[in-house]
Amino acid sequence: MLYYAITEGIVVKVEASYYPDASTPIRNEYVFVYKIQIENHSTETIQLLRRHWIITDSYVKREVEGAGVVGKQPILEPGENYEYVSGCHLISGIGKMNGTYLMQKRDETRKMIKVKIPTFYMVAPVLLN
């Protein structure tokens, strides 16, 4: 399933899938991969500076913050997009993620924008009846 959110002309799309080869359900280790595409539909050049994730593993929440994504702080001109793949480990096999990217306009205003990352869900197929 494709999830998306739009903030000030910045579109964030997410697709998540279960990764059975890296998972060990008998030990409560469930691995998911997610692909993110960020599209700049605004008229301004922007740079992704930081990420903030809220990861809910059944009922347990944790937060992850840091610079950039997968070691990069991409700059997107109007009309450009950036795509990356990352992963998440869950112990319950059922969870969700959402959060924000802190982006900055590259014009004279240097305005900071919190760009919404849509909530997306992860469910290990081995748990479904």
Image (cartoon, rainbow, N blue to C red):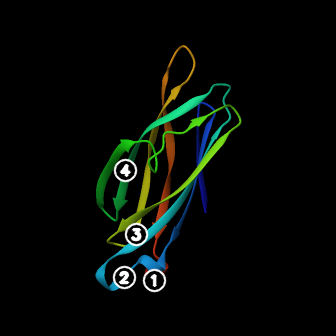
Mark positioned earlier in the residue sequence (4 or 1): 4
**Mark 3 / mark 4, whichever is N-terminal:** 4
Residue marked by disc 3: 94
Tell me the residue that label 4 is attached to: 54
For image coordinates 45% across by 83% down, the residue present is 126
Q: Nearer the viewer, residue 1 or 45?
A: 45
Marks 1 and 2, the one that precedes in the sequence = 2
Pointer 4 with pointer 2, Cβ within 8 A: no
Q: Earlier in the sequence, mark 2 or mark 3?
A: 2
Does the CB distance between marks 2 and 3 fall below 8 Å?
Answer: no
Mark 1 crowd level (few <14, some 14–19, many ≥20, 10 Å Cα)? few
- The reply to whether callout 1 and callout 2 are in contact (CB within 8 Å) is yes
Distance from label 1 to label 2 (Cα)? 8 Å
* 38 relative position to 24: left or right: right
Amino acid type, callout 4: Ile
Mark-to-mark CA distance, 4 and 2: 23 Å
The residue wearing badge 1 is 126
- Give SS at disc 2: helix
Q: Do the numbered discs 3 and 1 sit on residues whose CB atoms are within 8 Å?
A: no
